[in-house]
Amino acid sequence: MKTNIALGLVMLSVLLAPVLRRTGLDPHSMPNGSPVLAESQQTSESALGALRTSHQGQPVQAVLLADIEAESDPDRRSEAIERVVESVCPADLAAMLDWLARDASLGAAELSQRLVRRWAESDARAAAAWASQLPEGDARRAALGQVAIAWANTDLPAAAEWVLALPGGESKQAATLDLGYEAARTEPVAALELANTLPPAPERDDLLVYAVSQWSGTDAATAAPWAVKVPDPSLQQRLVAAVAVASAEQDGAGAATLAASALEAGDEQDRAVVSVVQRWAQNSPQAAASWVSEFPDSPSRNAAVQNLLAVWVAQDAEAAGNWLRELPAGPLHDFGMSAYNQALADRGRSSPVVAPAAGM
Amino acid sequence: MIGLTRFLRAAMVLAALSASVHAAQGVTLAWTPSTNTDVVGYHVYYGGASRSYTNMVTVGSTTNAAIPGLVPGAEYFFAAMAVDSAGMESVFSNEVSYQVPLTTTPPTIALTSPVNGATCTAPGTMTLAASVTANSHTITQVQFYNGTTMLGASTSAPYTMTWNNVSAGSYSLTAQAVYDSGSTVVSSAVNVTVTAPPPSGGGVLFSDNFSAGLSPWVSKQGTWTVAGGALKGSSTVDDYGTAYYNTNGWSNYTYQASIRFSISNGAYGGGIGGRLNAANGAHYTAWVFPEGSSGGSCVIKLMKFTGWTTWTGTAMGQASLSSVGTNWHTVALAFQGAGITVSYDGVQKISVTDNSFGSVAPYSTGGITADLGTYPTAFTLFVSNVSVTAPTGATQAAGVPLVRRLNGAGSTVVSPPLNVKVVDLPAPWQTADIGSVGVAGSASVSKAIYTVNGAGTISGTADSFRFVYQRLSGNGELTVRLNPAENKGSGRFGVMVRESLTKGSEYAFLGISPDGTLRWQGRSKTGGSTLSAASTIGAQQSVWVRIVRTGNVLYGYQSTDGTHWTKVNSQTITMATQVYAGLAVASGSAETLSAATFANVTVVP
């Protein structure tokens, strides 16, 4: 433990040196002969705890925060925040967060988020208790979200229980969304359960679509009938489209059937159909091509042909050319030729002539 | 003797889609272990009355037990016994009781009408409606609020009320459900705008919703652009900015527009002007000074400019405003002979007579302006929904331009000639602003070139930018050709694989950064920090970039010819299976747009 503290102090010394120099607090040139880091080492407290006492009236937390605020480049600012986050000892997290909660600056808010996240990754309940006592507002929303995301990855049921027990309001809804998205990665059905606790809103619907998409990647057979039965017609179309697209790689024919039969004509169906073709073409380009051949002449058919040939040409340009050759003369063949040549060009290939089938 | 210490938590189930998350009610008990070394396990007894136990659960040597299947609303009493190797039980521990909650889920409420962003014309009439999910609670009433002011209440479903005679302005509406013994739950806020009615009169001389570029407006002072259906003006701090439409002949007219400021405090002021002499900048203006302005906090003034950047120094008239903030407000400046009136959100605030009319030409006829003064903080003034209406029977001088109306029903549409056909994005592409941007982005495609306009930043723990995307299932790749010279500002643009469309999503990005380098960025944890790395690309007109997802590893490649590729970076980012791949554009600022084009776009999803 002492070794860790000492190591932390050494690292913090390296971190703080340029900051302190800029603010006239160089630890190696303090006029009173009491280098700040030497003091810290003598106390045997955690790094931040020892440094919490002010020097020339300025708390070290304020110096660290000023260092972040001084960084206008977003990447360097992000790196500065990470350096501070890593420098804070776990025992000091609560005190640091309490101190930051009194500061309305953007840097304080950003740093708080990262510290809460770090705390939640090691002690989710403690971080949750701290976040829960914040007054309603942006800081509370952000803190609850960070706890929800971290906790979801260690104990999803506990995280869900905590989020659902939060008092109602925007913060709770935002935390439920954050938890839902994180849950959807591995537990999409749990994510759907969480989404179902939210009032109807575009954000809830987006989560439902996202979760059902993940669910369909592994269990489209269950997800599809569930999606079809959703009563809200607009949401139902989005959900069905998500199922079709996500399942197309495993079952192109099934996805095509779903997209054709359960989606109404329109943008949602157009996007789903082209997406299904993209995925189906990777496994069964000939079957996908046959399906595309049945589409009516439309921009969506052209998009489908373009995407089909982009995939097919990369796999087997000759087979793609044969399919084109057997198409009757007409818009499909003409557009297919153009798309075929473009696909060849994109792949750095020369363009063989593919004439339409004789007599057609 | 053992002591029962505490409840831990109620159990929950998140497994079955059809089940409520609280369908299974239970409790977990824990106790201190017996000090008797012969103890091999414990029995937990419980029932519905104190010291009268009807159920027993055999527990191993652990010192806690989950008791499922309790009846919601019922009270249970628990005690434990230690059991030794001979099967003998100890005396009961202390007893604890537990009241199973009826439900832990509070009611939910959503304001279903009006929808967020709705607008109507004053005097407005709005139907407010709320949807409530009681979750086994008793809803006593639903109250509707404008900010903190209650507008009315409804005691039974469907929860609705009508809000009449709503004056022009911006409103934040919520619904609050009161349940059980006075507990409350509040809906998300819905923001609506009520605009002042268009001026009545003899006819519309001009209108512009800024859907067709800056023309015919001329940027005279400062920077003026058109984006998101608004004219946007900014200027150097401590200077004026003006855009104008020079009409010469207009004399008696009402010029009305919606305006808003980008910041809520620290903006000096801005507004609209009329009877402009474009030769020297002389004109009248109606300026709004928002909260904290050194020109007066929450004030509207009628001022007389003698040039583009000079005015008489004394307002011709002024009036206090209750609030300005960053909401849209309607300002109207009306000229009728020597009479000038100024209205704010449909209410007349200033009325003066200026005898300059008729004697000094610049103040008798002329065009219209949008202008601002920037001090001490840089800000952006947005102007939209411009209309210029002539009073009934008014006569205008010769040479007045033809009516120019944009996109109004039954009106003439004037748009710049297009050399190529710009179409919506082809399937399966979609586009959206990710995160919070101050100005909406856009995307179009023409001749296989994708043009994307986006505001915001891609960095830190949350992003804001314009995304043109399609779904990516498992492994896949996206290749495009970029023009580095297009990055003239502080933004960045390139290709991105993103787990979700939320602002804190995990992602990998490869694109052009402000310093002209090729930048790799990644966020490997939702809501976490962004890590980045740069590599040089040299002076070249175009660069090909490719982002590839293989399992949990994202790779970035660059090429000068689209054939020979060099790996730029790679990063392990564990994303869900179904993600998004697309084109990302961020200007570096929430309030400004920057444009980027993407050619040779190919996707293997």
Image (cartoon, coloured by chain):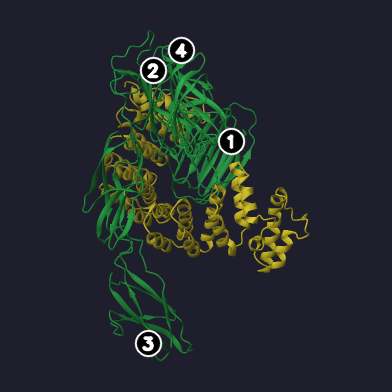
Nearest to N terminus: mark 1 or mark 4 = 4
Label 2 vs label 1, nearer the camera:
2
For the residues labelled 1 and 4, say whether their Cβ atoms are less than 8 Å apart: no
Same-chain check, marks 1 and 4: yes
> How far, Cα to Cα, is label 1 from label 4?
53 Å
Sooner in the amino-acid sequence: mark 4 or mark 2: 2
The residue indicated by pointer 2 is B338
Distance from the alpha carbon under mark 2 to that under mark 1: 55 Å
State which chain disc 2 sits on. B
Q: Which residue is mark 4?
A: B360
Q: Secondary structure at mark 4?
A: loop
* Residue under the image location 61 percent in, 48 percent down: A68
Q: Chain of mark 4?
A: B
Labels 2 and 3 share a subunit = yes
- Report which residue position mark 3 lands on: B92
**Can you give x and y, in whole percent of width and height, for residue B372 in the image?**
50, 28
> Alpha-carbon neighbours of circle 3 within 10 Å: few (<14), some, or many (≥20)?
some
Mark in the foreground, 1 or 3: 3
User: Are callouts 4 and 2 both on one chain?
Assistant: yes
Image position of A320 (left or right of A33)? left
Who's green, chain-wise? Answer: B
| Alpha carbon distance from label 3 to label 4 | 103 Å
Closer to the eye: label 2 or 3:
2
* Tags 1 and 3 on a common chain: yes
User: Identity of the amino acid at label 2?
Assistant: Ala
A119 over B299 or under it: above or below: below
User: Does residue B206 show up?
Assistant: no
Q: Nearer the viewer, residue A30 or B490?
A: A30
- Marks 2 and 3 in Cβ contact (< 8 Å): no
The residues tagged by marks 2 and 3 sit, at their Cα atoms, a distance apart of: 97 Å
- Residue matched to label 1: B513
- Color used for chain A? yellow
